[in-house]
Amino acid sequence: EDAAQGNTPVDVIDMKLYGQMDGKSVLEKALSLINK
């Protein structure tokens, strides 16, 4: 449901680009940057 709203499209892009890699690490990094 949250994804439908698209609160953070960056996360979606990261997940798509780094889907094969560690998505969690990318998400955590992205969230850290966003929180900053």
Image: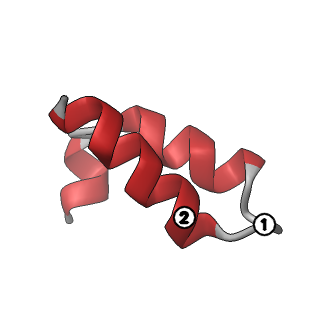
Query: Relative to residue 12, is residue 35 drawn left or right?
Result: left
Query: Relative to residue 1, is residue 22 drawn left or right?
Result: right
Label 1 environment density (alpha carbons within 10 Å; few <14, some 14–19, many ≥20): few
Name the residue rendered at 61%, 66% in the picture.
23
Quarter of the picture holding the C terminus: top left
Name the residue rendered at 21%, 39% in the picture.
7
Q: Position of residue 10 (x, y in %)?
A: 45, 34
Residue 12 sits above or below residue 33 on the image? below
Mark linked to residue 25:
2
| Secondary structure found at label 2 | helix
Which amino acid does the dot numbered 1 rest on? Met
Closest to the observer: 2 or 21?
Answer: 21
Closest to the observer: 13 or 33?
Answer: 33
Measured Cα–Cα span from mark 1 to mark 2: 9 Å
Q: Position of residue 5 (x, y in %)?
A: 20, 44
Mark 1 in CB contact with mark 2 (< 8 angstroms)? yes
Q: Which residue is mark 1?
A: 21
Name the residue rendered at 40%, 35% in the picture.
9
| Secondary structure found at label 1 | loop
Mark linked to residue 3:
none
Which amino acid does the dot numbered 2 rest on? Ser
Closest to the observer: 5 or 24?
Answer: 24
Q: Position of residue 1 (x, y in %)?
A: 20, 65
Name the residue rendered at 19%, 59% in the picture.
2
Q: Position of residue 13 (x, y in %)?
A: 59, 39
